[in-house]
Amino acid sequence: MTRIEADWLRDPALRTILSSLSTNGEEAKVVGGAIRNTLMGRPITDIDVATTTLPAETIARVDAAGLKAVPTGVEHGTVTVVADGRPFEVTTLRRDVETDGRHAKVLFGRDWAADASRRDFTINALYCDADGEILDLVGGLPDIESGTLRFIGEASQRIEEDYLRILRFFRFFAWYGRGRPDGEGLRASSRLKEGLDRLSAERVWNELRKLLAAPDPARALLWMRQAGVLSRVLPESEKWGIDAIHGLIETERLYGWAPDPIRRLEAIVPPDAARLRDMAGRLRLSNADRDRLVAWAMAEAPATESDAAFRARLYLGDADALADRLALALNSERTAATQNPDKLPQVALLAARHEAAVGFEPPAFPLSGHDLAAAGVAQGPEIGRTLDRLKRAFAESGFVLGREALLKLV
């Protein structure tokens, strides 16, 4: 019998939930990611609970225990229990009775094996009680030990229940897998990839973003490309390729950059503003992500200008977009320098300029539109044009021109 020791198992809030749902013939156990991550030495974020109690009984019991119950998904058996200011998702044991590739109709039950068999991957279908005793009904423990990401039962059947599981297969492989992906899962994902077209854009991008946020998504992206899945959901990457992504991961580690899904996306799509606008619309990216991608595409490529000219470019342009450009240029030059040491000075220059761009704080401009109007500049567009001209002069002076000197240029 396998047992785990974890601080979260001693959490009074969790123990209250488990104990209130585990009396009079009912049972409740922690399920899924908290167990998986504990066994793999990964941080714990959410703690989910599975129970034999029906949703109405779940609500009644946690209310009686002095906790707050929110019926967030009772039609699917899920009640969110708020304890000590934190949410815990509590879901009644289920089995699928009808699936359409996106949603499932379920029946509630009391069979732990049936509940486990409807889940996606073996490593996500582990349960444990309040004492940490693990219930493994699908072979998840040996798969965690070997770093194998494997569908429960027949891979094709699991995917046809919800085609999003194709992307989840590669996303979980990026985070938890070792070696090669499971062969059956890979073949089924490739064969059924057209089903991805039936998914909402929001669900697709949510999975892609999580995959790109993994410590090293390079292998997962490679296998996605091999299976034809990447070009299905991200056709912009097809001719551009993903060859830069492995080097970018190494560059991030070398310079201590935090994983950035958008920067990694930029590494595998072409810097074409029009195509990126279309991609952002298709995938329903946030306005901020869309604008960042477009600004990166439109930013001038890094050049070997003087430091003063570089600072002026930071001031007059989009410093964040230039930082993205510099990051990818640095990655390219650093990779090339492994074969050609003559590239090392350029690598050092790009690294310094990337650091400067990331930490850039624009100097305060000493004039305003009111100052220009008082100096006799006509109201309207002329104010804006004059401000732009003076800001350029301010930047090109090395930011030393003061208020009076700038007014003399009006």
Image: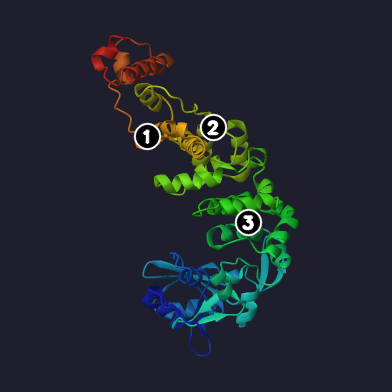
CB contact under 8 Å: marks 1 and 3: no
Q: Quadrant of residue 8?
A: bottom left
Q: Position of residue 119 (x, y in %)?
A: 62, 70
First in residue order: circle 3 vs circle 2? 3
- Residue position marked by numbered label 2 in the rendering: 297
Residue at the spot x=41%, y=79% of the render?
Answer: 15
Q: Could you tell me the amino acid type at mark 3?
A: Leu
Q: Quadrant of residue 283?
A: top right
First in residue order: circle 2 vs circle 1? 2
- Which residue sits furthest bottom? 24
Query: Between 133 and 149, which is closer to the camera in this rendering?
Result: 149
- Residue position marked by numbered label 1 in the rendering: 352
Q: Position of residue 360 (x, y in %)?
A: 35, 34
Q: Is residue 223 above or below residue 18?
A: above
Query: Looking at the rendering, in which quadrant would you find the C terminus?
Result: top left
Give the class, few, some or many, for how many residues have Cα within 10 Å of label 3's Cα (few <14, many ≥20).
many
